Each structure stands twice: as structure tokens, then as C-alpha cells.
Amino acid sequence: MINHINSTARDSLNGCTPYKLSQLLLDITLHKCLSFIITGNKS
């Protein structure tokens, strides 16, 4: 459910998905760190 919600573009975000907007506004290091925490990947 969370993945579906965050992959839906929204008018209030100028047509961006919440995930895409976070990629534009936040540091890539944070995304890599969160990916490690959520998936357990060591890459």
C-alpha cells in the first residue's frame, strides 16, 4: 500500500510523485540510507 501511495503523481505536488519530489529536494545519501534500512541491502 505504501509503495502505491508514494508512486501516484499529485496535482498538489505539480504532477510529481512524493518519492520523485523527495529525490529533488533531499540529499541522495539520505535515500541510500533509507533504502538500506527498508530493504536491508548492503549495496
Image: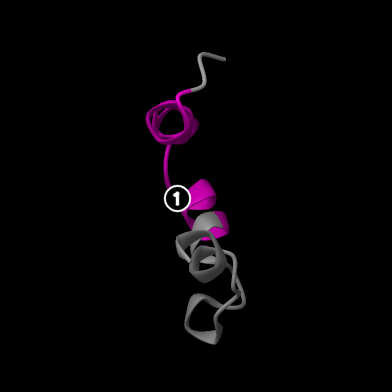
Q: Position of residue 18 (x, y in %)?
A: 49, 64
- Which residue ends up furthest to the top in the rendered image? 42
Q: Main secondary structure of the magenta part?
A: helix
Magenta stretch: includes residue 1: no
Q: Position of residue 33 (x, y in %)?
A: 40, 27
Picture residue at 59% right of the left edge, 65% below the top: 7
Q: Is residue 1 above or below residue 9?
A: above
| Residue, disc 1 | 25
Q: Is residue 38 left or right of residue 42?
A: left
Q: Nearer the viewer, residue 34 or 21?
A: 34
Q: Is residue 34 left or right of residue 3?
A: left
In this rendering, the count of numbered labels is 1
Q: Is residue 2 above or below residue 12?
A: above
Quadrant of the rendering where the C terminus is positioned: top right
Picture residue at 48% right of the left edge, 32% below the top: 39
Q: Is residue 13 above or below residue 30?
A: below
> Which quadrant of the view contains residue 11?
bottom right
Q: Amino acid at mark 1?
A: Leu
Q: Is residue 43 above or below residue 28?
A: above
- Span shown in magenta: 20-40
> Which quadrant of the view contains residue 27?
top left
Q: Position of residue 1 (x, y in %)?
A: 48, 66
Magenta stretch: includes residue 30: yes
